[in-house]
Amino acid sequence: MFNIIQHKTKIMLYICLFLITLSIVYTSTLNPFSNRIMNVDTSVYITITQGITRGQVLYKDLADNKGPLTYFLSVPGYFIGGITGVWLTEILLFYIAFLFMYKTAILFVNNNIAVLSVFATSLTIHPFYYVNAGTEEYALPFLVISLYIFTKYYFSEKKISFFEIMALGFCFTCSVMIRLNMFPLWAGFCLIIIIELIIKKKILDIFKYIFVFTFGIFIVLLPIYIYIKYNNVMNDFYYNVILGSITRGFRLLVLNDFLKNFYVVLNRSFSFIPLCISIILYFIKYKNISSFYYFGFFLSYLLSNIFLSFAAGNSHYNLILIPFFVPVIAFLSDILLQLFSKIKYKYLAILLFFCITFSEGIIRLSYYIFFKFDSSTQLRIAGKIIDDYTVPDDTIINLGWNGYIYPYTKRHYASKYIYQGSAFNHIPDANENFISTIINNPPKVITIFIAQDGGIQQFIPGWHEEVYILLETDYTLISSEHGIKIFLREY
């Protein structure tokens, strides 16, 4: 009887986690039931994924500055079900993330509070998910799994296994092969664990952990290295990913700019809370074994904020801070449970508290559920117009910093620079290469996205002057009614 009840409880847990997952991913721009235009970064990631499934080589035929797993994770889903398949991939990745958020929370609190903590954490995701989410959401499950293992190391009665240490190396490499600046979570905790082992004179354990962690790294890096070596794109990989990520993600700033960015990052939707709570808990638990955990937590979170402050752009960067909310919200939930202990519906009171606290998440969720959009419908119509005026061997290029139109047309891209701009300033002769390709092998169709700003910001000096001259002489405007201007080459 007890086993039956336990089994039903697990089923209810998995259903709750799935509903929490659905509440996030239903609002995705990849949702086939939604008609919202993709986030600008997402449109590029989907376009490159689309190109890979058509046989094009990453970094050689398709330029971008993110790690290869950003696209490879989407390839199976896209190959099977197109954009809908990638949306299903999102569901899977978020479900894994929420499952390990629960596993982390349950190390601190009871089952009901753990589920409430996961739901409250999901509300903190909404303000960061609607901007340019892509790399951060793909890295989220690897970040959450790693935080769970670090937390288990200190708070679980079961000893951490070599498999879990290997998983740390695996998750670390997956994250940095999505985006290089994802490493702070591991840097902070690993440093504290090494210091702790040195203090306890367990030097042999340090070497064991490093060896197993490195093996986890090797599992991910080997197939990536084979792909890069086989396709002879090592130089392209260096310029696109290594140099590109350093240039854009680790900018040298004056102190005032850095402090301003640090302030902005911490003040996005209560992102200062994990930092403050970790400091408080460290001093409360001082001289306790768990103090090492809270110091590692603090250091990892601080490093994450520091590296975000070097490149404080859109708020979606803050998604990598979400895993740190889980232990903190669990801690706060436990305090609230004690405060509301005499209230009949105490769990409902805790739920209401977090709904009010993170009301921005509720508001954004409601907005995208209840309001109708047609921006992607317009792009689908534009894509059909392009396909109707062209044949399979024809090529297309979009002028500007986005890839909105590509997922909705069957035509190949005329240049590896599917979007243009400062993202490629670190690559020698990138703009010259783009111009030369377009001038010497003119695409059948050139498009300019005009729905948001009339196309004004899509003109990029140094990239488009000669192409605009070509538009005036060799192309005819055949449509501008669906948020995008479509120019057809006359001969």
Image (cartoon, rainbow, N blue to C red):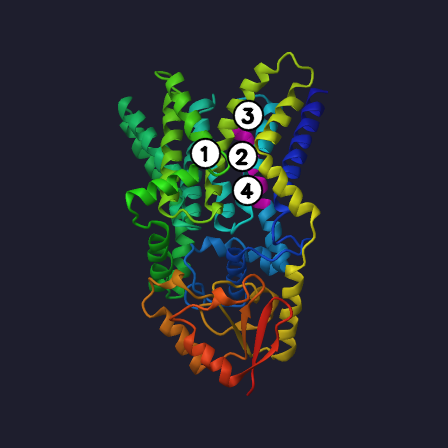
Quadrant of the image containing the N terminus: top right
- Compared to 87, does 358 lie above or below? above
Q: Earlier in the sequence, mark 3 or mark 1?
A: 3
Dominant secondary structure (helix, strand or loop) of the stretch shown in magenta: helix
* Magenta residue check for 109: no
Pinpoint residue 336: horizontal percent, then vertical percent.
57, 19
In terms of secondary structure, where does tag 1 sit?
A: helix
Which class describes the residues within 10 Å of circle 3: few (<14), some (14-19), or many (20+)? Answer: some
- Is residue 102 something that shows in the picture? yes
Q: Which residue is mark 3?
A: 106
C-beta proximity under 8 Å, tags 2 and 1: yes
In terms of secondary structure, where does tag 3 sit?
A: loop
The circle drawn on residue 100 is 2
**Label 2 to label 1: alpha-carbon separation:** 9 Å
- Compared to 432, does 320 lie above or below? above
The circle drawn on residue 147 is 1
- Residue type at numbered disc 4: Pro
**Label 3 to label 4: alpha-carbon separation:** 25 Å
In terms of secondary structure, where does tag 4 sit?
A: helix
In which quadrant of the rendered view does residue 354 lie?
top right
Q: Earlier in the sequence, mark 2 or mark 1?
A: 2
- Viewer-side label of 3, 4: 4
Magenta region: 92-107
